[in-house]
Image (tube, rainbow, N blue to C red):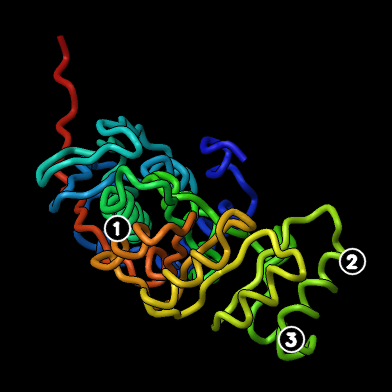
Amino acid sequence: MTEGHVFDDPAVERLIATAVEEDLGRGDITSEAVVAAGRRGLGVVQAKSALVVAGTPLIARVYERIATVEVTYRSAEGAAVQPGAVLAEVRGEARALLAGERTVLNLLQHLSGIATLTRRCVQAIEGLDCAIRDTRKTLPGLRLLEKYAVRVGGGTNHRMRLDDGVLIKDNHVALAGGVGAAVAAAKRALPAHEIEVECDTLSEVEEALGAGADVILFDNMTPAAIARAVRLVGDRARMEASGGITPERIREIAALGVHYIAMGCLTHSAPAADVSIAIAPLEPERAR
């Protein structure tokens, strides 16, 4: 799926419809009480902190479910901007601008927060042969957008959903009777798929190699254990590290020789970026 098509995906359309409905309810009674009908306004969407821009095309998608507005984009997706940067401007009926304000901000703050954290992590391992990957630790309903934000920040996506790839985890291993047995079963059932398996110990890594795993994930291993595992694997499989890896530790881990670092925090713990919408009256154009 191309980046432009993410926002047209039916799942995203359903999410926006739900988000608008849950916030708007039967109508914005405060705005209807204090803002004159027909009054026009200009909403300026502005960064209040340094951030990586992600999700601005959703501004138009949100507002089109409320009223007809004009959106002008001022900052490109993926741009690193400083406090005060204008991300977009929205012109239209003032009540409508107010009705969509919170939903727009919720999405922009969350997605820009993910992109900002991802960019920080990607920059931290610059120059090393390693990629930052996300996980399925996403908020229900938001996965397409959250993984989009990871890409905007320079990271890469792992599985989008369970039918998108093979990843044998600890519970699969327990139910299958061991790492080797699980990998062998997956290779028989899914010969055209890349087989990745989580390993907690060096003995499990040896089992995975013996069974022909394509990717071995070192799960919650110490840096010393990862270093030993990397030497054991050599060039026989690609390697990934995961489990509580923070932005402060990723360069240390990447330097050990793994090909990927999986970070659930990119989506489940990214701090919201600080974005605001200031709405001012838009005076009617004077007759000439």
Percent across and percent down for residue 103 are 37, 59
Point out the tag, 3 or 1, that comes first from the N-terminus: 1
Instruction: From the image, state whether disc 3 or disc 1 is nearer to you.
Output: 3
> Dot 2 corresponds to which residue?
188
Instruction: Estimate the spatial distance between the alpha carbons at disc 2 and disc 3, rounded to whole Å.
Output: 16 Å
Q: Nearer the viewer, residue 93 or 22?
A: 22
Percent across and percent down for residue 37 are 28, 48
Point out the tag, 1 or 2, that comes first from the N-terminus: 1
Image marks 1 and 2: residues in contact by CB distance under 8 Å = no
Find the residue positioned furthest to the left: 84
- What is the count of numbered marks? 3
Q: Nearer the viewer, residue 216 or 58?
A: 216
> Dot 3 corresponds to which residue?
178
* SS assignment at label 2: helix
Please tell me the numbered disc located at residue 169. Answer: none
* SS assignment at label 1: helix
**Disc 2 residue type?**
Arg
> Dot 1 corresponds to which residue?
117
Residue 214 falls left or right of residue 91? right
**Within 10 angstroms of label 2, few (less than 14), some, or many (20 or more) residues?**
few
Residue 83 falls left or right of residue 142? left
Residue 8 falls left or right of residue 96? right
* SS assignment at label 3: loop
